Amino acid sequence: SFQAQAGNLSYTCFAGKLDKISVIGNRILTKCVPTSENPAFVKDLPFASASMDQKGVDLMFQLLLKGKELNKNILFYIDEDHKTNPAGCDPGNCRRLVGVTLE
């Protein structure tokens, strides 16, 4: 798992709800379809994006893909401050992804 630092928001992307995983160079973009079980903010922030070295992107991509293949819940850790968003992560619907854990 990619562990996040204290102070970040977290939410569960429930099994079968990971709708998108894109890798573009050293950036990864995900989309989680919110459910009624998610906190309200997830409806407004379905996208999460991370920019890191290629090894980090590859590892996070493999974790996300494995979670999707195994139909597992995935815990997303995001930075609530939109000012830290990587390029291409719209402040209106996206936050910087700082970690993931398979549940």
Image (tube, rainbow, N blue to C red):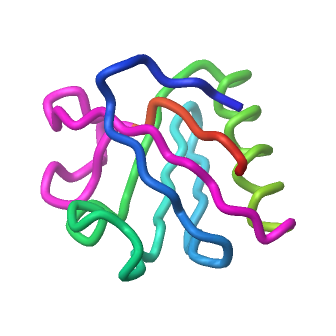
- Which residue lies at the image location 27% right of the left edge and 72% below the top edge? 43
Q: Nearer the viewer, residue 21 or 70?
A: 70
- Which residue lies at the image location 22% right of the left edge and 67% below the top edge? 40
User: What is the residue that sits farthest to the bottom in this orientation?
Assistant: 36
- Which residue lies at the image location 53% right of the left edge and 33% below the top edge? 99
Is residue 13 depicted above or below 57 in this figure?
below
Can you give x and y, in whole percent of width and height, for residue 15 in the image? 67, 72
Instruction: Using residue 57 as the reference point, say whether residue 77 is left or right of it.
Output: left
Is residue 79 depicted above or below 19 in this figure?
above
User: What is the residue that sits farthest to the front in this orientation?
Assistant: 37
Quarter occupied by residue 97: top left
Can you give x and y, in whole percent of width and height, for residue 56 in the image? 67, 24
Q: Nearer the viewer, residue 90 or 65?
A: 65
Is residue 51 depicted above or below 24 in this figure?
above
Instruction: Using residue 89 as the reference point, say whether residue 54 is left or right of it.
Output: right
Q: Give the magenta-colored segment's residue range.
A: 70-96
Q: Is residue 66 magenta?
A: no
Can you give x and y, in whole percent of width and height, for residue 2 in the image? 64, 28
Identify the image quadrant of the N terminus: top right
Q: Nearer the viewer, residue 103 or 20?
A: 103
Instruction: Using residue 10 as the reference point, say whether residue 67 is left or right of it.
Output: right
**Total tally of numbered discs in the picture:** 0
Q: Nearer the viewer, residue 44 or 7?
A: 7
- Which residue lies at the image location 41% right of the left edge and 80% below the top edge? 35
Q: Is residue 80 magenta?
A: yes
Is residue 5 depicted above or below 49 in this figure?
above
Can you give x and y, in whole percent of width and height, for residue 4 in the image? 49, 24
